[in-house]
Amino acid sequence: MANEFLVSVADAILRNATTGAGIAYGKANISSAFTLSMQKTEVRGGRNNPLLYSYYHDRLVEINIEEAIFTSSVLALNAGASVLNAAVTVLGTDCIVLSASGSGTLTNTPTSSTVAVFLPDGTIADVTPSTTTITYLAGASQRINAVYEYSDTLDRVTIDTNTPPSVVDLTLIADVYNSAGTNTYKIQINVPNFQISGNYTMNFTANGVASQSLEGNALSNNATDCSGGDYYATVSWIAQSGTTIAVAQIAATPAAIEFDDDSIPDTSQITVYGLRGGLYTNTNVTTSCSFVKRAGDADDISVGLHTGLVTAGSDVSGSDVARIDISYYDATNGTLTDVVEVTVVE
């Protein structure tokens, strides 16, 4: 059996935790990490204080994603805000060469009564604009930087003082390869309620690009049925390239079928489970099996070749019997078989 490896980084998909609406799809991540941890309380007692029991509690699921692409969505999630598009006040920074009379034209119309003028020699002057025109005689024929406020319609994230970080549905998707170089599975980690930590750092470097981090914890998600409790996340292995789950043996249920002669015609369904062993639960392989009635057995008892549905027709009588041979091919363990005995009682 080939060894398997989880390679590279995971793609990250963010959706609204309530509606499932898309928020972001991160496919340029630098790193991604999934951490599962618990706290331990030791119970000790007796001579020399031996360890009697360890009580594990406070399970925590943490996820950290670092991406190379800069987007406003990541900042908004950390701030618990939306990216709003509206008319807002921003700062203009124009590089202008003033005329011989010291005048120049700004790119935008200032909303402020003052324009700060920065000269090459370090001098700073404040001038009053006239619409988009500024005049500063001392800077005549010089290249200056003009800084001023103006209004524009654009995207903006407001980081307020009390809004908690967003809670989203987060899914990580990564590839699993075996030592033969085959993509056997995609591993998919889904956190239905992922609360962003609100810790955000925007690093600026002179010789590179800024990266963004998205980190947080999984919140408890309510169970949908009574078979299991609340949960943090699910981890799924999605088979690729025709890969199937290996099973060691098969078990058919019921192991024996009994028809009552007084209730003929009648049907009974055979279900076949693949037994995997270890920590793996059984898997239903019924539709992947072949069901064949042995030659010479009761004529009016039949079985669906790939359905496992056994039918006893109206010509069946008491003491009739049939044996159903079941076969399943596993790429790892070869052909696996089981038998179901069918009888008719009066």
Image: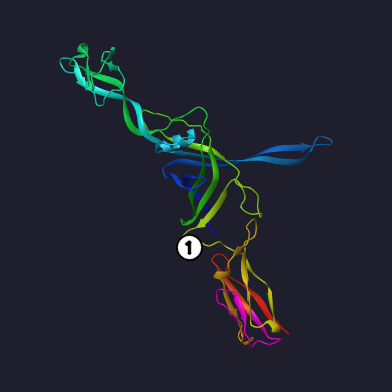
Q: Give the side of residue 176 with respect to residue 346, left or right.
A: left
Verify whether residue 195 appears in magenta: no
The magenta-colored residue range is: 302-323
Compared to 311, does 148 lie above or below? above
* Quadrant into which the N terminus falls: bottom right
Q: In the depicted view, which residue is nearer to us: 168 or 62?
A: 168
Q: In the depicted view, which residue is nearer to us: 10 or 1?
A: 10
Residue furthest toward the left?
100
Which of the 4 quarters of the picture holds residue 29? top left
Could you tell me the amino acid type at mark 1?
Gly
Mark 1 burial class by Cα count in 10 Å: few <14, some 14-19, many 20+:
few
Name the element at disc 1: loop
- Residue hosting label 1: 242
Which of the 4 quarters of the picture holds residue 286? bottom right
Residue 228, given in percent of the width and then of the height, sits at: 65, 52
Residue 260, given in percent of the width and then of the height, sits at: 70, 81
Q: Give the side of residue 66 with respect to residue 35, left or right.
A: left
Q: Which residue is at a point 64% across and 60% down the rendered structure image? A: 277
Q: In the depicted view, which residue is nearer to us: 76 or 160?
A: 160
